[in-house]
Image (cartoon, helix red, strand yellow):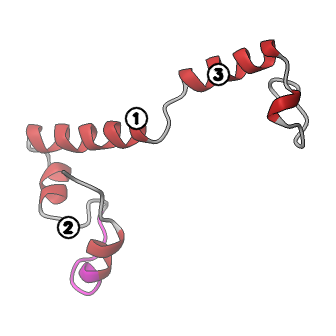
Amino acid sequence: MSKFYLHDTIRVGELSQNQVLDLTAHLDSMKIENHLRRQINQDIQRLRDTGTYRGRRHAMNLPVRGQNTRSQIKNARFFNRVERH
């Protein structure tokens, strides 16, 4: 909001046409929601395809970043789950 000199309590109806165009152009340049999910899934798939250690850990639903698996594997599998199709 500060980048476009807009007040925090301004309403959409109060924006000028130029401000709306600037905001939409800025939002189009950002990766949001589905684009980020798709990028994360592509990164994981790339790791799996190249056969890296991290890719194999992702494929087996095990912790990837060096967590202890002897006593914490149930929690790690539950909390680190990523939507994979």
Q: Which residues are magenta?
A: 66-74
Residue 35 numbered mark, or none: 1
The picture quadrant where one finds residue 42 is: top left
User: Where the N terminus falls, by quadrant?
Assistant: top right
Residue in view at x 33 percent, y 66 percent: 80
User: Do callouts 2 and 3 mark residues in contact (Cβ within 8 Å)?
Assistant: no
| In this view, 16 is above or below 41 | above
Residue in view at x 87 percent, y 41 percent: 8
Q: Earlier in the sequence, mark 1 or mark 2?
A: 1
70 part of magenta stretch: yes
Residue 62 numbered mark, or none: 2
Nearer the camera: disc 3 or disc 1: 3
| In this view, 77 is above or below 82 | below
Residue type of the residue flagged with mark 3: Thr
Alpha-carbon distance for marks 3 and 1?
16 Å
The picture quadrant where one finds residue 5 is: top right
User: What SS does tag 1 mark?
Assistant: helix
Residue 58 picture location, percent across and down: 19, 56
| In this view, 28 is above or below 55 | above
Q: How many marks?
A: 3
Which residue occupies the foreground of this view, 73 or 84?
84
Question: Which residue sits furthest bottom?
Answer: 71
Quickly name the residue at label 3.
Answer: 24
Residue in view at x 28 percent, y 76 percent: 68
Nearer the camera: disc 2 or disc 3: 3
Q: Main secondary structure of the magenta part?
A: loop
Q: Earlier in the sequence, mark 3 or mark 1?
A: 3
